[in-house]
Amino acid sequence: MVDDLPELVHLVRRPSWMHDALCREPGYAALNWHPRPRESAAPAIEVCQRCLVRDECLAFALDNDAHLPVGVYGGLSGKQRRRLRSQRAAARRERDDRGAVVVVLRPGRPTPT
C-alpha cells in the first residue's frame, strides 16, 4: 500500500488542464460518467467529443487507468481504452518484429504529414 502512495498523490494533484474539461461544467454533472455494464456511455462520450482537453484527458486515462474509477475519459469507455491499448501494443510488437516504424495516433489527433 505504501508503494502506491506516489501514484495516488499524482492523482490527487489534478493537472491544470482538468480545469478546462467540459465535464466539470455544472450542466453536465447529472450525466452518467461512470456507467455500469450494459448502461450507455453515449451521452458522456458525446460531451467529450466537444471538449477542448479531450486528448489530454485520454492520455491521462491511458497512463492511470488502473487507479481511476471505471468510466468515460477522453471520449472513450474503459472497454474502448483497453482496445486502444491493445491495438497500440500490437502495433509496437509488429514494429519490433519487422524493424519498421508503425505510427499509432491518438484518436482526435491530425495525421502527421
Image: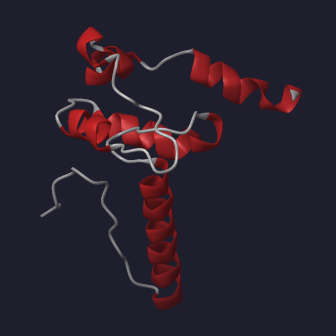
Look at the picture and state if 31 lies above or below 110.
above
Q: Does 6 sit left or right of 12 as displayed?
A: right
Tally the marks: 0
- Residue 96 x, y percent position in the rendering: 52, 81
Residue lying farthest to the bottom in this orientation: 98
Look at the picture and state if 38 lies above or below 66.
below
Q: Does 33 sit left or right of 23 as displayed?
A: right
Look at the picture and state if 58 lies above or below 26.
below
- Residue 15 x, y percent position in the rendering: 45, 20
Residue at image x 20%, y 40%? 49
- Residue 16 x, y percent position in the rendering: 39, 16
Residue lying farthest to the top in this orientation: 26
Quadrant showing the C terminus = bottom left
Residue at image x 45%, y 54%? 81
Q: Does 85 sit left or right of 44 as displayed?
A: right
Residue at image x 26%, y 37%? 43
Residue lying farthest to the front in this orientation: 38
Instruction: Specify how the rendered protein is coloured.
Output: secondary structure
Residue at image x 32%, y 69%? 103
Q: Does 1 sit left or right of 60 as displayed?
A: right
Residue lying farthest to the right in this orientation: 2
- Residue 45 x, y percent position in the rendering: 29, 41
Instruction: Give 107 or 38, whichever is nearer the viewer.
Output: 38
Quadrant showing the N terminus = top right
